Image (cartoon, rainbow, N blue to C red):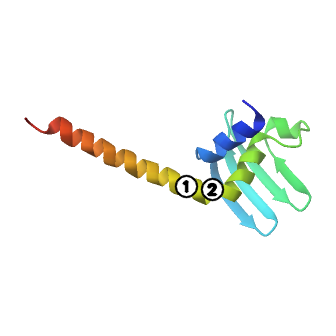
Amino acid sequence: MSLNEKAERLAKTGAVTSLLVEGDLLTATVEGDTGTWKVHRDPEGWTCTCPANTLGHKVCSHIGAAALYEKYGVMWDAVNRARLRMARRDNGKEKDASTSRP
């Protein structure tokens, strides 16, 4: 899985658990595959507390996830809520059908 694919997966599946944006500043918490990391953006660039970023990599999947979530998160949240409502509705229909008598 590429870094971009991993970032998109994290952003779409709720791994960005907090996001605060004030002007050019961003602070996020991202639950990665191996831990929970803090992502920051300021006028000088992006940083992340994960090992990959602290070892000198310019971008990690957590930074990518925070950037994607900043741009598309509201839309993804709405889609996920709609899917959850549909699943609950469908589960309710299945229960009704399984408890009805012929």
| Residue at 52%, 57% in the rendered image | 78
Residues at marks 2 and 1, CA–CA distance in whole angstroms: 6 Å
In the rendered structure, which amino acid carries the disc numbered 1?
Answer: Asp
| Residue at 19%, 39% in the rendered image | 97
Contact? badges 2 and 1 (CB < 8 Å)? yes
Which quarter of the figure has residue 62? Answer: top right
Which quarter of the figure has residue 92? Answer: top left
From the top left corner, tell me how far across and down residue 75 is, in percent: 58, 58
Residue under pointer 2: 73
| Residue at 58%, 53% in the rendered image | 76
Q: Is residue 59 above or below residue 22?
A: above
User: Which one is in front, 59 or 53?
Assistant: 59
Image quarter (top left, top right, bottom left or bottom right) of the C terminus: top left
Which quarter of the figure has residue 22? Answer: bottom right
In the rendered structure, which amino acid carries the disc numbered 2?
Answer: Gly
Image quarter (top left, top right, bottom left or bottom right) of the N terminus: top right
From the top left corner, tell me how far across and down residue 9 is, in percent: 64, 40
Residue under pointer 1: 77
Q: Is residue 5 above or below residue 26?
A: above
Label 2 SS: helix
